[in-house]
Image (tube, rainbow, N blue to C red):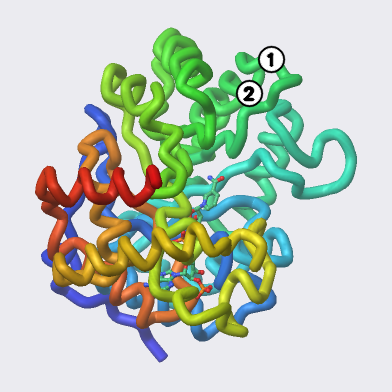
C-alpha cells in the first residue's frame, strides 16, 4: 500500500516562524508521548500520523522515552518513516529529546554530555535517521553544570546530528542563561518547549517575557491538561481514557470535583463560541504570539480532526478572556 500525501496539505494549516529563525512550524504539531508506543495499536498511530501530514502537520515531536515501553514510539515512527514518509523527509520537522530516565545507571537520565550524546545516537538508530531537526534537553539538570548540557547540544549540531536545538521546561532564568550561552557560539537555539494550558499558566510569570525579548520560538505541551480540558471526563472516567489506563503521570486522582466544575463552565463558554472545549483550549493557547505551535497528542483520529478545527476560531473577545480567567480563578 503506497502512501501518497495530499497535494493540498500546505493550503490547510497556518504556520508560524520560530522567532527570527528559518524554522517554521504548523500552528498545530503532533506529539507521540502516548498513543504511539509498543502497547498501542500500530495501525491507529500510523493512520493519525499520515492524516496529520495530509492536514498540513509536518512537525512530529518525539523523545527517547516515549512509548511505553520507552523507545517504542521512536521505533514505530521509524517504521512509518521508512514505509510511508521517506519521500517527504525534507519536508518534515522531527524532534527528539533526552533528559528523563532511559536506561540504568548514572548516565541514563538528566543532562550529562555522556547521556545526551549516547541518547541521540540511540534515537537516530531507532528512527532510521541521519539527523533530527530539533534536539532538546528535556529538563534542566540541577547537578550538571548548565554549560556542559548546552555545549553538548552545540557540538551535536556541529556534528550534523541535529539542525536546531531546544530546551524543555527550563525556567525563565535558566532560559535567559541558555540564550546568553548559545549566542556566544552562534548555536541555532530556536525553541523552548514548556507546559501550558488553562490550568497551568506558569509561563505567564516570566518565561513569555524572556521568549518575546529574545525572539525565541516556543511549542506548548499538554495543552488539554492530558484530556481534562475536553468533554472526555464530564460523565465519569471512560475505561479507555488516559486517566483510566494510568499510562502517564495522570490518573483518576487528578480529576477532582472542583476541576470538573470549572470544565463544565468552560464547556458552556466554548459552546457559545461555536466550539468544543478542546478546540477552545487550543485556540486560547495560540492567542499568544510568542507561541509558535501547540502540540496535540490524540489517541484517535476523531480527536485529531476535532482539534485541528480549533483553528477555525482563534479570536477571543476581552469578555471571553475575562470569563476564562474568572472561571479558573474561582
Ligand atoms: N517536553 C515535555 O516534557 C513533554 C511532556 C508531555 C508531553 N510533551 C509533548 O506534548 C505532546 C502532547 O501532550 P499531551 O499528550 O499531554 O497533550 P494533551 O492534548 O493535553 O492530552 C492528550 C490526551 O487528551 C485526550 N484528547 C485529545 N484530544 C481530545 C479531544 N478532542 N477530545 C477529548 N479528549 C482528547 C486524549 O486522551 P485519551 O487518551 O483519554 O483519549 C489524549 O491522549 C506529547 O505527545 C509530547 O510530544 C512534552
> Is residue 83 in view?
no
Residue underneath mark 1: 145
Question: Quick check: 292 above or below 225?
Answer: above
Q: Which mark is residue 149?
A: 2
Direction from residue 92 to residue 107 in the image, left or right = right
Residue shown at 56% from the left, 24% from the top? 155
* CB contact under 8 Å: marks 2 and 1: yes
**SS class of the residue under badge 2?**
helix
Secondary structure type for disc 1: loop
Q: How many marks?
A: 2
Residue 19 drawn at (x, y percent): 25, 30
Residue 225 place in picture, x, y as percent: 48, 56
Circle 1 Cα neighbour tier, 10 Å, few/some/many (<14 / 14–19 / ≥20) = few
Cα separation, mark 2 vs mark 1, equals 7 Å
Q: Position of residue 105 (x, y in %)?
A: 89, 40
Q: Residue at x 38, y 51 (%)?
A: 93
Q: Is residue 117 visible?
A: yes
Amino acid at each position: 500500500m503506497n502512501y501518497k500525501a495530499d497535494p493540498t496539505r500546505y493550503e490547510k494549516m497556518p504556520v508560524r516562524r520560530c522567532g527570527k529563525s528559518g524554522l517554521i512550524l504548523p500552528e498545530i504539531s503532533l506529539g507521540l508521548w502516548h498513543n504511539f508506543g509498543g502497547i498501542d495499536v500500530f495501525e491507529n498511530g500510523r493512520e493519525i500520523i499520515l492524516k496529520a501530514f495530509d492536514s498540513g502537520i509536518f512537525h512530529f515531536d518525539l523523545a527517547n522515552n516515549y512509548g511505553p515501553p520507552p523507545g517504542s514510539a521512536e521505533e514505530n515512527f521509524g517504521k512509518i518513516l521508512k514505509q510511508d514518509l521517506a519521500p517527504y523527509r525534507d519536508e518534515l520537522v522531527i524532534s527528539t529529546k533526552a533528559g528523563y530516565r532511559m536506561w540504568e545507571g548514572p548516565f541514563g537520565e538528566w543532562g550529562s554530555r555522556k547521556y545526551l550524546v549516547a541518547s541521540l545516537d540511540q534515537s537516530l538508530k531507532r528512527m532510521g535517521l541521519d539527523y533530527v531537526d530539533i534536539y532538546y534537553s528535556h529538563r534542566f539538570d540541577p547537578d550538571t553544570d548548565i554549560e556542559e548540557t548546552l555545549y553538548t547540544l552545540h557540538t551535536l549540531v556541529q556534528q550534523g546530528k541535529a539542525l536546531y536545538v531546544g530546551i524543555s521546561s527550563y525556567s525563565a532564568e535558566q532560559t535567559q542563561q541558555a540564550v546568553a550561552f548559545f549566542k556566544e557560539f552562534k548555536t541555532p537555539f530556536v525553541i523552548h518547549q514548556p507546559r501550558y494550558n488553562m490550568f497551568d499558566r506558569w509561563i505567564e510569570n516570566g518565561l513569555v517575557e524572556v521568549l518575546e525579548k529574545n525572539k525565541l520560538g516556543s511549542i506548548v505541551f499538554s495543552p488539554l491538561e492530558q484530556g481534562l480540558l475536553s468533554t472526555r471526563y464530564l460523565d465519569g472516567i471512560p475505561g479507555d481514557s488516559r486517566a483510566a489506563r494510568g499510562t502517564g503521570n495522570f490518573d483518576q486522582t487528578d480529576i477532582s470535583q472542583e476541576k470538573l466544575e470549572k470544565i463544565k463552565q468552560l464547556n458552556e463558554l466554548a459552546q457559545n463560541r461555536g466550539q468544543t472545549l478542546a478546540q477552545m483550549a487550543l485556540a486560547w493557547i495560540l492567542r499568544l504570539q510568542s507561541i509558535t505551535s501547540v502540540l496535540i497528542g490524540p489517541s484517535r483520529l476523531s480527536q485529531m480532526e476535532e482539534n485541528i478545527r480549533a483553528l477555525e476560531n482563534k479570536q477571543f473577545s476581552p469578555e471571553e478572556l475575562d470569563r476564562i480567567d474568572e472561571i479558573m480563578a474561582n
